[in-house]
Amino acid sequence: MFSWLDERLALSRMYKKFFRKMFPVHHSFFLGEITIFSFLTLVLTGVFLSINFEPSIRMVQVGTKQLPAAYASVQFIDSLPFGMVIRSMHHWAASVFIAAAFLHMIRILLTGAYKKPREINWIIGLLLLSFAVMAAFTGYSLPFDAFSATATKVGYEIAASIPVLGTWLGQLFFGGTFPTEHSIPRLTAIHMIWLPLIIGALIGAHVLIMFLQKHTQPKYAEKVAPGKILGVPFWPQQALIMGVLFAVFVGVLAMVAGLFNANPIEHFGPPGPATPTVKPDWYFLWLYGFLKMIPSSWHFTVFGVYVGPEFIGVLIPSLLILFGFAFPLLQPSKTKLRYLELPSEHPVRTATVIGVLAFFIASTIAAYNAELSLSTGFLWFLVLLGPVVVAVLAYLLLRAIYPRREGASGD
């Protein structure tokens, strides 16, 4: 039977090409696997949630109360055996997905693994992270409690603030001025169908390109096994490692979900006339903090097109993503990168990454200004000049600790 299939499908050649591919064994390389494990967990838990979820804001009778159908269906999910745990697993898996993908991108940045011939995979990784954040936002809206309705309303206002395209984007993604009867069904379709398909395709393309290209290796492999991949083959060793790690991942995630329930909807209740004071999850806090700093008076009209302060919420992430796309072009490489570069050997690049991280941290601190009561001037210094100061200090410190060696790059 195998010989019959092998003659037609070339299974032996595929086995040697893909299943015997060597994988370096290094703890930082598992960030990519954790990203995939999170996506698989999101899909599996999402199937259970979708079966029991009604994507509608029509009013239904629940006991003595009239509640939106989406809200009532989430209450029903929480009442099922392990329903709250599965919903919490879905929530925490989304956080791990974004965190692991972000840390994976940082590792690639610091080690130069975005250079030739891996520029395409770098772009795919950026797109993957961007769509993951979009999936997290669209998932925010679905319970349709006071918290999610408020957060989604802010997202709608940011999208609608885009000059020229805002009205069209609001209609496409939100079904008009949020909330309308079309909002939750449309966001549900985007969250449960289109974004998982896009993310799954990007992960597939990312993994396929990684298999086709020769894997990068830690720097020490250059001395231990020059010209060879220092690691284990995908099958069966790497596959076994990944299987054990996935089992541990699901077990830990289930324990966390059982101990820390995700956003109990009864805490905020269904949407009402009052707007609750809420803060988004950690991956949106930096943007929330930056937007809170923008005065409402910052608006102007250009060629008859109104530009408001909410547009900053689109502009800043867009500029960061464009900068990320351009990063490989700013450091063109004539030779193929085989061994990961040490961050200490590239102080400019390392200091730049540290500066961007400092910007995210400072903007996140700004999100808690209501509790910290910091002055406006200090906040602007912290968010705009603080990262520059941190980057310069990081560069000087790297230069002092690791003096430039002859022939070493200073990028």
Image (cartoon, rainbow, N blue to C red):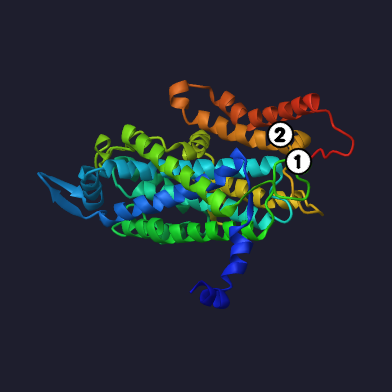
Quadrant of the rendered image containing residue 304: bottom right
Q: Which residue is drawn at 29% across and 47% down?
A: 144
- Type of amino acid under label 1: Val
The vertical placement of 408 against 386, above or below, is below
Residue 157, can we see it?
A: no
What is the C-alpha distance between the residues marked 1 and 2?
30 Å
> On the picture, is 249 further left or further right than 145?
right
Q: Earlier along the polypeptide chain: callout 1 or callout 2?
A: 1
Label 2: which residue? Answer: 351
- Give the image location of residue 56, x and y in percent: 26, 56
Q: From what the image shows, is residue 170 above or below residue 287?
A: below
Q: Mark 1 points at which residue?
A: 224
Q: Which residue is drawn at 37% across and 53% down?
A: 44
Amino acid under label 2?
Ala
Residue 359 percent location from the top left of the image: 60, 34
Of the two numbered discs 1 and 2 in the rendering, the one whose residue sits closer to the viewer: 1
Up/down of 133 relative to 172, above or below: above
Q: Quadrant of residue 235?
A: bottom right
Dot 1, how many residues are within 10 Å of its Cα: few (below 14), some (14-19), or many (20+)? few
Residue drawn at (58%, 25%) of the image: 377
Q: Is residue 161 left or right of residue 325?
A: left
* Side (left or right) of 371 relative to 263: right
Tell me if residue 70 can be seen: yes
Place of residue 177 in the rendered image (x, y in percent of width and height, measured from the top left): 36, 54
Camera-side residue of 335 and 177: 335
The quadrant holding residue 258 is: top left
Residue 298 horizontal/vertical position (percent)? 54, 40
